[in-house]
């Protein structure tokens, strides 16, 4: 019988003990004596969130296909267990073996959003691994980070030995082979890091030195080791059919956020929304073939027992084989108790027809993401969506039987006026009017239009990386403008308005665009008790305010300050393929309100064609 790291006495007093016991269907167990490398793969949030992350499942499967590697999983203990582990000095452990993380060779942490940063320190702290990479010895695991937030790794630079920039399928094998060689030759930790720095896509923070101007902006960022390149280039998979995919993903014991088979149909996005980091850093768009996806669906359903298939991508409607794939899935699985979910769709006649066949319309709501209320603002952000598109889609949806619609918007976008804000409520009301245009006998009671606004955060490697943010109180004022506009609408009883937390948004902005100097704020915030900052019930803004005061760091420098065209950014040493010149050109087009065609309509010369494939080369063979 497996020995658990936590005794029954603790498991019985904490929330959801199944988060911590491992042993799920399709989890991988190996003999530690038969492997050379032990890798703890971490998602720094609770089990249910981490188990829903496809990227972690892909790497888990890929690593465990190697006979010389055993990859296990670790997640952030919830606050109840965190307290017990600290009090009793219980080291954080991996799920499969229940062994302490500090005994592993690698600790890999996927960094998906800024508000998990204190959880990263929790993982290191509870694992009894020194927080600072320079304090670690040959006895400590190599701590490596990856994921979208690794595209500005600087706020976390002190805490990681390595960052992997790009998609994990490309150079991880080379890195693990180099580690094996380093161990066999008895080389030091620093010697391995020097070798790692020579591998494309690997960034070793200790081998780089930032310098600053008197005004606090970055003056230079240079390698201080002959092993470290001046620029680190992202690694991406160009042939999506040739890379590994988890045919037997781990099935969670408790309900995860996304408890279903996930078919990743493509990577990247052709749209070029100017606020969207994913749309820029994952260029060029690359598709999986329909035939491969058909095989994946059958195999994964057989191996998991899941009752739902989700088609995953940044913009599923732009997948060229969508009609063929959806038709196949409907014909193959209709009547077999298998649901099909189609997120990230642009609402058109085909999409609505497909969803009508696969969803229980009475229970489900449709989601549109206009992002801005006025056409002027949608042109500024390059949304490529007109009011006519939105209202036509809503009208077709209502005629098809839906009566619930969710609308997602952003507040605080560059050039936004109060009139643009009020247009959010006006657009929501126009959507409701489309419902009441239906003959009464075709309606299903009242419609329900829920509009939600998040506050805009300028992200690295987007055209809006030069934009300034608002103070928290200004975000609150803007939400108030929208709220009052909703109260003025004719169909206000059918409308509901929600908005994001302004104080969280300011923090996201600091860490999205921060440099190494904000690392000490993060460390101080964790010391003061900040943890699970992305959860409303555990977010304590007053502690963050104190952390900034205690460290003498001004958050406004990273958020409110405007940036010149020439300013050197902390992330400029990373090459994503999308050129800074293209991003600046898109910023200027945004200021003019000029729309840029999507990648299939016309190439705009962003630079991603240098990867030699994907949408950039469609039809050129």
Image (tube, helix red, strand yellow):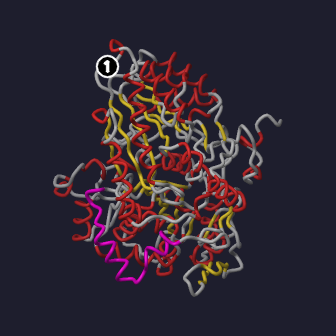
Residue 477, percent across and down?
A: 35, 59
Q: Is residue 111 magenta?
A: no
Tally of numbered tags: 1
Single out the residue that lies furthest toward the bottom.
214
Residue 97 versus residue 160 in the image, above or below: above
Residue occupying image coordinates x 41% and y 47%: 422
- The range drawn in magenta is 536-561
Q: What secondary structure is marked by label 1? A: loop
Percent from the top left, x then y, of residue 119? 37, 64
Residue for point 68% across, 74% down: 228
Q: Is residue 547 magenta?
A: yes
- Quadrant in the picture for residue 470: bottom left
Q: Residue at x 45, y 75 (%)?
A: 519
Label 1 packing within 10 angstroms: few (<14), some (14-19), many (20+): some
Above or below — where is 258 with respect to 563? above
Q: Is residue 301 left or right of residue 169?
A: left
Is 598 positioned to the left or the right of 99 in the image?
A: right
Q: Is residue 481 above or below residue 305?
A: below
Q: Residue furthest top?
A: 441
Counting from the top left corner in percent of width and height, residue 597 is at 69, 42
Q: Quadrant of the C terminus?
A: top right
**Residue 433 position in % (x across, y down):** 39, 27
The overriding secondary structure of the stretch rendered in magenta is helix
Read off the residue under disc 1.
Answer: 444
**Foreground residue among 180 and 490:** 490
């Amino acid at each position: 019988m497996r020995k658990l790291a936590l005794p029954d006495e603790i498991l019985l007093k904490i929330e959801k003990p199944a988060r911590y016991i491992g042993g799920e269907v399709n989890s991988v167990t190996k003999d530690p004596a038969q492997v050379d490398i032990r890798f703890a793969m971490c998602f720094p949030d609770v089990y249910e969130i981490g188990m829903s992350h496809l990227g972690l499942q892909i790497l888990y499967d890929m690593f465990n296909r190697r006979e010389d590697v055993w990859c296990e999983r670790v997640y952030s203990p919830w606050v109840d267990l965190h307290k017990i582990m600290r009090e009793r000095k219980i080291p954080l452990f991996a799920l499969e073996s229940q062994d302490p993380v500090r005994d592993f060779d690698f600790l890999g942490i996927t960094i998906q959003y800024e508000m998990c940063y204190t959880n990263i320190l929790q993982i290191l702290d509870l694992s009894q691994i020194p927080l600072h990479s320079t304090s670690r010895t040959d006895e400590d695991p190599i701590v490596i980070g990856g994921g979208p937030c690794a595209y500005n790794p600087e706020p976390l630079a002190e805490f990681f030995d390595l960052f992997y920039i790009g998609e994990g399928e490309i150079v991880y094998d080379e890195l693990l082979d180099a580690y094996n060689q380093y161990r066999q030759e008895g080389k030091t930790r620093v010697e391995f890091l020097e070798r790692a720095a020579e591998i494309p896509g690997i960034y070793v923070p200790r081998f780089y030195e930032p310098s600053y101007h008197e005004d606090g902006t970055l003056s230079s960022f240079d390698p201080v080791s002959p092993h470290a390149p001046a620029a680190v280039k992202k690694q991406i998979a160009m042939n999506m059919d040739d890379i590994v995919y988890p045919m037997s993903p781990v099935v969670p014991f408790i309900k995860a956020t996304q408890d279903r088979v996930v078919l990743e149909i493509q990577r990247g996005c052709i749209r070029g929304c100017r606020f969207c980091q994913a749309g820029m850093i994952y260029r060029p768009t690359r598709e999986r073939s329909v035939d491969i996806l058909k095989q994946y669906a059958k195999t994964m359903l057989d191996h998991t027992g899941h009752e739902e298939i989700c088609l995953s991508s940044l913009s599923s409607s732009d997948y060229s084989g969508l009609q063929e794939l959806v038709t196949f899935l409907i014909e193959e699985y209709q009547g077999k108790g298998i649901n099909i979910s189609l997120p990230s769709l642009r609402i058109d006649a085909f999409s609505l027809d497909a969803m009508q066949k696969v969803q229980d319309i009475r229970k489900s709501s449709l989601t549109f993401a206009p992002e801005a209320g006025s056409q002027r603002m949608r042109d500024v952000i390059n949304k490529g969506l007109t009011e006519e598109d939105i209202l036509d889609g809503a009208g077709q949806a209502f005629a098809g039987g839906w009566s619930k619609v969710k609308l997602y918007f952003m507040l605080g976008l560059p050039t936004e006026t109060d009139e643009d804000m009020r247009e959010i409520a006006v657009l929501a009301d126009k959507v409701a009017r489309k419902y009441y245009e239906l003959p009464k006998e075709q309606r299903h009671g009242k419609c329900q239009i829920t509009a939600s606004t998040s506050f805009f955060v300028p992200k690295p490697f987007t055209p809006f990386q030069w934009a300034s943010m608002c103070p928290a109180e200004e975000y609150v004022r803007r939400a108030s403008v929208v709220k009052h506009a909703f109260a003025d609408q004719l169909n206000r009883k059918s409308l509901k308005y929600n908005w994001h937390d302004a104080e969280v948004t300011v923090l996201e902005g600091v860490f999205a665009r921060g440099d190494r100097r904000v690392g000490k704020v993060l460390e101080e915030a964790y010391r003061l008790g900040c943890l699970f900052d992305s959860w409303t019930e555990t977010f304590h803004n007053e502690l963050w305010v104190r952390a900034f005061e205690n460290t003498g760091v001004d958050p406004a420098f990273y958020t409110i300050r405007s940036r010149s065209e020439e300013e050197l950014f902390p992330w400029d040493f990373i090459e994503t393929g999308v050129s800074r010149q293209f991003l600046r050109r898109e910023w200027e087009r945004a200021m003019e309100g000029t729309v840029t065609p999507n990648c299939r309509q016309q190439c705009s010369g962003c630079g991603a064609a240098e990867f030699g494939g994907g949408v950039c080369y469609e039809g050129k063979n």
